[in-house]
Amino acid sequence: MWSQVYNPFGNATLSTIAAAIPVVLLLAMIASGKVKAHIAAVIALLAAIAVSVFLFTMPAGLATRAALFGVATGMFPIGWIILNVIFLYRLTVERGWFATLQQSVGDLTTDRRLQLLLVAFSFGAFFEGAGGFGTPVAVTGAILIGLGFSPLAASGLSLIANTAPVAYGALGAPIQGLASVTGFDPYVLGAMVGRQLPFFSVIVPFWLIWVFAGFRGMIQVWPAILVCAVSFAIPQFLISNYINPWIVDIGASLISMACLVGFMRIWRPREVWTSPALRTHDISASTMTRPAPLSAGTANVTPKASRNEVIRAWVPWIILSVIVAIWGTGWFKALVNPIFTWNYPVPGLHNMVQKVAPIVANPTAEPAVFAFTYMSYTGTGVLIAAIIAGFVMGFSPLRLVTAWFETIWVLRYSLITIAAMLAIGTLTRFSGVDATLGLAFAGTGILYPFFGTLLGWLGVALTGSDTASNVLFGGLQKITSEQLGLSPILMAAANSSGGVMGKMIDAQSIVVASTATNWFGHEGSILRFVFWHSIVLACLVGGLVMLQAYVSPFTNMVLH
């Protein structure tokens, strides 16, 4: 068994710099726009292996197995979800049903700002709550690009919108993961997160429209933004504090959508915003095209769809929503996992790496079991929904099979990228490289509530998952906060709340966004667009946690 080394140079600064090499290299290559994402991911993976082996003393065999383990977890469940969501999307485009759906959203409102609120924030929050793991960005990005938004607007704004709901994503998976490593009651943790994120559930919709349309454009529709934001934030607080942390996003998103649609029936902005591009310089505006059908001549729809055609166009997405909601429930997983699961302990890696102090109180072996729960994967539910919807749309079995393989070919580089990204995240976890970065944040003393929150942000930026970040740093948050005399529940929750703002810059989310919007090869542009928004919002969360830790009125929120 190999024990992780967190300070290989005997100097915390040098060790932290060494640990940061793979992620800095990856982000720099992507942001430069000169290296394609899949190539950058592979290069960064090789760098991560080199850093782990030559600097952090991890045996080469362990490093190789950890990277391959990450490749598998990258394909399942992340790549599996994206593949099948885009498969469904392409089917609806081919039949012309997606164009009708676009028209139906446009009939609700032709104002692009209100479309963003409805689709990117409220509808996206539903898919985050039901499925998580890339589903909301894939779905909302595809819908927005279909509505005519520019690729940068559709991808970047989908990423910004998919923040406040993330801590309760996939039916509370991040909260459950946090509970598993801290030993705290998930209801208590969910309630604490529910005293942090509702503030940002109000801020993010305003932020979203401000980024898209500018301050003046935001002010013009402030009543609708307020309705959307408050009708999400209040249920988010109430459900998380008084019901449970599992259905927070589902309940809040449904209430928000209902309130927003109802409000739009009685209120209209004085000036309708029809521009589909960002108000600031939008480098993607010149590339704007309507999604092309898979087969020529198959996407013809009438200029004005009838009521029945509109209802029909929503059927595939209703099927998807229902099945994904079922797939995310605990009772369904408990039903199918005992039967349809293949647990594969990775030879030579499982329990062969040991975490040590100060990351954990006692030496702990790191398990490496690839749980191939193929039936309960959200992506499997999406595939089943796509097949059902395909038959409803009149596709033959042969065409469904050929269209699915066509989708694999279209997504080939994206799937390679995602696999490499997860390989990096998994390798850094097993090598202790990410823990070294975490310890750098933990050494900030009185400022720890702020920097501890940013630690959660870093964890999600590195791993692409609030759940993974919570599992990675939850124990460290508990130990460090107890040493500093802070509330460990507050800091554990802050890890999750801060982490949600890192979701928009994690590499796999950016790849999902570029794939969903058919803007392949522009991941660097998307990263540059969302990067500072991610940092500023994460710092705002850190500021709130500082207030909760040290300022009496806010501290009372923690104690009660």
Image (spheres, rainbow, N blue to C red):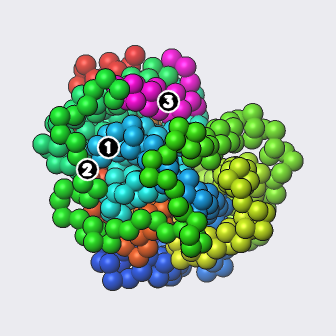
Compare marks 1 and 3 and give the one earlier in the sequence. 1
Compare marks 2 and 1 and give the one earlier in the sequence. 1
Say which of 315 and 173 sits in front: 315
Label 2 to label 1: alpha-carbon separation? 7 Å
Label 1 to label 3: alpha-carbon separation? 21 Å
- Judge whether residue 298 can be spotted in this image: yes
Residue assigned mark 3: 254
Corner quadrant of residue 374: bottom right
Say which of 557 and 266 sits in front: 266
Residue furthest to the left: 216
- Judge whether residue 545 can be spotted in this image: no
**At numbered mark 1, what does the secondary structure look like: helix, strand or loop?**
loop
- Residue type for callout 1: Thr
**At numbered mark 3, what does the secondary structure look like: helix, strand or loop?**
helix
Corner quadrant of residue 517: bottom left
Graded by Cα atoms within 10 Å as few (under 14), some (14 to 19) or many (20 or more), the crowding at tag 3 reads some
Residue appearing at x 38%, y 82% in the figure: 35
Prevailing SS of the magenta stretch: helix
- Residue type for callout 2: Thr
- Magenta residues span 241-263
Compare marks 3 and 2 and give the one earlier in the sequence. 3
Q: Classify the position of the N terminus by image quarter.
A: bottom right
Corner quadrant of residue 259: top left
- Return the mark for residue 110: 1
In percent of width and height, residue 265 lies at: 35, 26
Label 3 to label 2: alpha-carbon separation? 26 Å
Left or right of 210, for residue 19: right
